[in-house]
Image: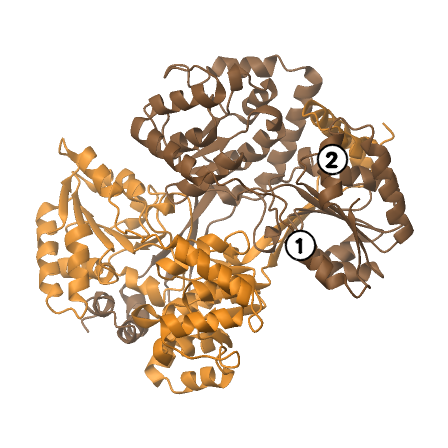
Chain colours: A brown, B orange
Amino acid sequence: MPVRLDAAAADFEPRFRALLAAKREVSPDVDATVRDILAEVRRRGDAAVIDYTKRFDALELTPETLRMPPEAIAEAHAATPPATREALEFAHRRILAHHERQRPKDDTYADALGAVLGSRWTAIESVGLYVPGGAASYPSSVLMNAVPAKVAGVERIAMVVPARAGELNPLVLAAAHIAGIDEIYRIGGAQAVAALAYGTERIAPVAKIVGPGNAYVAAAKRQVFGTVGIDLIAGPSEVLVIADGANDPTWIAADLLAQAEHDAAAQSILLTDDAAFADRVEAAVEAQLLALARGETARASWRDFGAIILVPSLDHAPPIADRIAAEHLEIATEDPDALFARIRNAGAAFLGRHTPEVIGDYVGGSNHVLPTARSARFSSGLSVLDFVKRTSVLKLGAEQLRALGPAAIEIARVEGLDAHARSVAIRLNL
Amino acid sequence: MPVRLDAAAADFEPRFRALLAAKREVSPDVDATVRDILAEVRRRGDAAVIDYTKRFDALELTPETLRMPPEAIAEAHAATPPATREALEFAHRRILAHHERQRPKDDTYADALGAVLGSRWTAIESVGLYVPGGAASYPSSVLMNAVPAKVAGVERIAMVVPARAGELNPLVLAAAHIAGIDEIYRIGGAQAVAALAYGTERIAPVAKIVGPGNAYVAAAKRQVFGTVGIDLIAGPSEVLVIADGANDPTWIAADLLAQAEHDAAAQSILLTDDAAFADRVEAAVEAQLLALARGETARASWRDFGAIILVPSLDHAPPIADRIAAEHLEIATEDPDALFARIRNAGAAFLGRHTPEVIGDYVGGSNHVLPTARSARFSSGLSVLDFVKRTSVLKLGAEQLRALGPAAIEIARVEGLDAHARSVAIRLNL
């Protein structure tokens, strides 16, 4: 049974705080192991990667077979059943169209003094894309990580995906083909992250590594951060559904379960102003759980981390939603825009009764890599901006330097930075 | 003596690699100490902060005196000598004007199917600004960190600055006043980072912490990352000056020293096609070092980390500059734009003979918080974007859901996510 909180009750604040503070995921401390793996790959290159892949993935590779033959990628795509291939290509087109709008624009201008200032954006040269193996090897994630990099203009995307005992999800290869990736290595874990960060004989290093992974991958990404850039460290998935009593409770139950089936540590929260509706949703969840392939996972998530929050009216929802700062926010009400305008913290918002969050996972067009664990308070989902960087530009003539120089010299002086002052003064004969 | 590399020499590649790989900074391992401090502040709040401040900063505070009286901030501003105050206000206006152009725009549109997609930007609610004490307590840094947050619309900026034995740089307070900050706590170190991240009785927690600090502060920021957002971890400063032989060698020498005086671990690199010019610059550096207040620091930096790279022609500069990926890039040539167009990795670029990097430190208008240690390959300087976050928005009607639903169901099916498929299918009566 999920917890039930009543915003009008005296004990709401402490209980809500406890809900927010609940640790849903205990990461095993693998830092020391990962440190060793990184050092070994750095020292021994491909040989170390091959050794670890044999040990952890039961896969025998050689320097020649680390990389998957590009033909095999095209073949996996060709062998994909047409309905699936068309769905992935449809998703790809929509993700592409949305991300095309995110490309930042350069801005160069002269100010009133004639000084030229600018912001120039360029693509990151090369990016490593980590794709998990096994059950969490999702073709949709390949598209979501690869498309913004491609749109940004990243010239080289190197994908790594572990192939336990040689097994690889062919749909992951099909998605890579659709996204235009042909450099794929059959490696995973911290050793793959190390190979991407430091480079080996066969694998050129990249400038940034993105993509989800297990505790070893996450720890490795944290440790190589600085040598390369990394994306956000994704935690278990979450949804907050704000719904009035006019919804079909089976629809809302289905949305809560779509989140819960991801992971026993996922979190589904219903916020409503209608206690009877909440009861109906709960009953519908129980009924739907019975027929679910991943029912056990979803049941554990709903039982351990699910929550129902009752409010006197939905007018009380925005401050609560902002404190939850959910990865996914569904607003299933008559006028969702009005409520959404009053909420600032959410990774992605899904407005109206006909916008289940799942559409955003696949074919909406926006990215499904989103900030979890309340980090929507300060961060954003993956976008083209994660694959570009900005150089600020300044260009002065002698006249502009004369206009700006004295103030710079004065600040340098009071900051005790002599040589700073001189580098300006020497040009002004001061 | 700085190293001298010749791009045309047989040993260039290994020597250049060694230059790039040189570790300029050894961070002491303070992780365990910092972990204890964070835990104590989390447990005991203000009392712990006050204890640590007494121990580390020799300053006796009470819960009532943790925060600086707002009047004291205004008084420090009023007491600032007019020339200094005007210089800081001039800098503030220019930084403000440049950053105003960085505010990202919301983007909402309907696609061909009638699905409404959007990207909505909102300001981070509250930000903590760390300002170092002692010699590195720079008023310019207060402006550079505070202005983009203000422009973004951050409602609350809480500044912390250690006041060793009660001493505070009044110009830091003056700069805070100019930037519109009136919430300042006289605390520093890991304890201040903990107070901002977790909150105490007197200090409300923030959503993101920015600003430079020592090894304890950097370690604390890394450890609280996730609970709050953090900015980039700044390393020692760097400049790459690309200069032809037509420059005044004393100007270029002054620019190299302006970087070197920051820190013995700072790095100044001259890249030129003119060996005789390089000799003249080196001689000018030696001459100017004699008259420098921070001569010892600058000398150590130039000796240990300075470098001169000779190229057969400046046409060879771009690939070398991209591998260096300098925080600051000066291009002092006749046609700097042409060269700059071929370089992609740099935090900030300063074009032409009359644009010393120092202008950008203070009054150019762009930000002086920039990526160091080659991280310009994958990251950008501080900007308004660091103080906002994006929520993606999707809104469908029944018709759009019918158009998008089948592909989503197909992908959910092949990914083995039953409940995902159902959350769409149940709305389509499938």
Residue B161 visible to the viewer: no
| Disc 1: which residue | A20
Distance in Å between CA atoms under marks 2 and 1: 20 Å
Q: Compare marks 2 and 1 and give the one earlier in the sequence.
A: 1
Q: Work out whether A298 lies above or below B81.
A: above
Q: Work out whether B95 lies above or below B25.
A: below
Subunit ID for the residue under disc 2: A
Q: Quadrant of the C terminus of chain B?
A: top right
Subunit ID for the residue under disc 1: A
Q: Position of residue B136 (x, y in %)?
A: 32, 68
Q: Position of residue A45 (x, y in %)?
A: 33, 26
User: At x 71% / y 62%, what residue is drawn?
Assistant: A14
Residue A48 visible to the viewer: yes
A279 vs B269, left or right, is right
- Residue B424 sits in which quadrant? top right
Disc 2 crowd, CA 10 A, few/some/many (<14, 14-19, 20+): many
Q: Position of residue B140 (x, y in %)?
A: 37, 69
Q: Which mark is residue A298?
A: 2
Viewer-nearest residue: B42 or B376: B42
Q: Callout 2: helix, strand or loop?
A: helix
Q: Amino acid at mark 2?
A: Ala
